[in-house]
Image (cartoon, grey):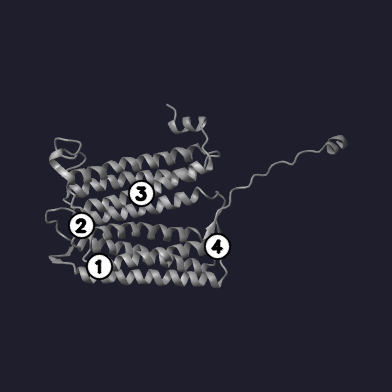
Amino acid sequence: MRNPLAFIAERWTPTQRTVQQAALISLVMTCVIVVTGGAVRLTGSGLGCPTWPKCTDESLTATSEMGFHGVIEFGNRMLTYVLCAAVGWAIITMRSQKPWRRSLTRYGWAQFWLVMGNAVLGGIVVLVGLNPYTVAAHFLLSTALIAVATATWQRTREGDDKPRPLVGKAVAQLVWALTGVTVLLIAVGTVVTGAGPHAGDSSDVPRMNVGAVGLDWEGVTKLHAVLAWIVVTLTFALWFVLKAVDAPRGPLNRTRDLFLILLAQGLIGYVQYFSDLPEVLVGAHMLGSCLVWIGVVRVLLSLRERPHATVDVPRPVSSDQLTSA
């Protein structure tokens, strides 16, 4: 039996723009499903469909008796299929591109398997009654998916030559430190969520605790804020260093974009904290978390360039050369 992707690739060649758009769509859909997943939790619809993979023991879909919460939860589940379609379309375009870039296709398949793994983990979240640790793992796996989707989008806009660094080793180390602190910031953010008041369901869902003692939500929130300020400081320091060493526009622009996103995210974070966590602002903060992570990954990827491979084309033979021969 022939590989369906190879069959399509023989008969269709997408434009470079089509491949880039497909990668961008999969990235956008990844962020959409993260935000809608947050909406499920913030509306108390986390157990709107009380089982998995079916919505109830008797029905695959939400029923009218389940009301608003069933619609929200089942709708989020359906968006997983939309995300799969977006990733599938990206894989098809990458496989059909001429010449075929195997490394790029592998990025697409990495997204697919992360989506499948997160779908299974999402089912486990429901089956264990929204245990906050599984909810945190669900979000962190989505964060990994966003990183791969961002890298895929970047790879569609560059070649396959060996990467060439655009900055020195010291600058690269600063960016890796920024990336590491951002990962820690996001991880602590899941603890803030897991110990906070938005349990995800109308019933009493246990919150994160240490042994029999609940976590100090105020203390964890302050730690989250401290880490956020460290990320902001590192980003500003990076921008200053890049200006001092006269770095190319790519890293400078990506660092500037990240700094602006961080300022907006920080403003939302403080407003939601001092206004008793209104659901709309918490949802906006989740979107901001996605954008911050995308911004950091783009800064990291901007430190090198991958030119398109050059192909040596034989020079045409002139008529004089033919005559002399």
Query: Compared with residue 232, is residue 101 higher up or lower down, i.e. above or below?
Result: above
Separation of marks 4 and 3 at Cα, in angstroms: 28 Å
Image coordinates for residue 291, horizontal then vertical, percent: 38, 58
Pointers 1 and 4 in contact (CB under 8 A)? no
Separation of marks 4 and 2 at Cα, in angstroms: 42 Å
Separation of marks 3 and 2 at Cα, in angstroms: 21 Å
Name the kind of residue labelled 1 in the image.
Answer: Tyr
In this view, the residue in front, 312 or 143, is: 143
| Left/right of residue 174 with respect to residue 191 in the rendered view | right
Q: Which residue is drawn at 40% across and 43% down?
A: 109
Name the kind of residue labelled 2 in the image.
Answer: Pro
> Which disc is residue 132 wearing?
2
Q: Residue at x 33, y 41 (%)?
A: 82
> Which disc is residue 273 wearing?
1
Among the two numbered marks 1 and 4 on one chain, the one whose residue lies closer to the N terminus: 4
> Which disc is residue 249 wearing?
4
In this view, the residue in front, 120 or 255, is: 255
